[in-house]
Image (tube, helix red, strand yellow):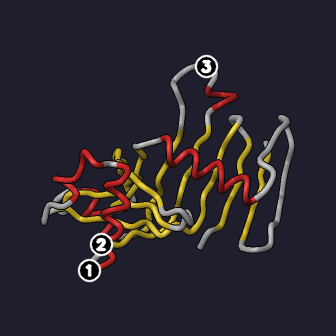
Amino acid sequence: MIIQRFSGPKELVVSRRRYGGYMKSKKYIEKALRKLFETQYLAVLATQSGGHPYTNLVAFASTDDLKQLLFVTGQSTRKYANMKSDSRVAMLIDNRSNTASDVAEAMAATATGRTEDVLGDEREALTRLYLAKHPHLEEFATSPSTALIRLHVERYYVVNRFQNVTELHVA
């Protein structure tokens, strides 16, 4: 297993090698994340309530600096209620194809951080960013009963080649 950690402007690399090949630098990781986010439309959002985990598929978009992930949800949903009571969430984005080759070729990124509703002038700008990726969701995204949610990413855990794990701090 390979574990690397990148934090802030200093790049601290901690690695344990079992199977060859790992991501080389913070810039490489960021480029790989941008490519993953451009090619994937859905993510798995994990919230919790009373210590019980709850997951949902969400259509997501990211800001170019990778510090924010955006998604929309109805304000009457369980996931929305969960985020209101505890803003800590995890979001998994991956490119698996459900084939044996995924062991060697798939990449998964888990983003952890806190969520908040996007309001005011900022909502308009970030809704445009979201709809640039998901124009088919315009009616839902602009409904008064829909919340635009921002995940302030604190860190990413990126896994490739099945056991190569990289931790990237972005907050």
Tell whether label 1 touches label 2 (CB within 8 Å): yes
Name the image quarter holding the N terminus: top right
Please say if 37 is above or below 162: below
Mark 2 → mark 3, Cα distance in angstroms: 41 Å
3 or 1: mark nearer the eye: 1
Q: Which quarter of the figure has residue 105?
A: top right
Q: Amino acid at mark 2?
A: Arg
Residue at image mark 2? 123
Question: Which one is earlier in the sequence, the residue at label 2 or at label 3?
Answer: 3
Residue at image mark 1? 120
Foreground of the two, 55 or 68: 68
Left of 155 or right of it: where is 26? Answer: right
Disc 3 is placed on an element classified as: loop
Residue in the picture at 69% in, 53% down: 29
Residue at image mark 3? 100
Left of 30 or right of it: where is 84? Answer: left
Please say if 154 is above or below 119: above
2 or 3: mark nearer the eye: 2
Image spot of residue 66 (x, y percent): 55, 63
Q: Amino acid at mark 3?
A: Ala
Tell whether label 3 touches label 2 (CB within 8 Å): no
Question: Which one is earlier in the sequence, the residue at label 3 or at label 1?
Answer: 3
Image spot of residue 92 (x, y percent): 49, 48
Please say if 8 is above or below 38: below
Image spot of residue 110 (x, y percent): 55, 52
Q: Amino acid at mark 1?
A: Gly
Crowdedness near tag 2: few (<14), some (14–19) or many (≥20) residues, C-alpha within 10 Å: some
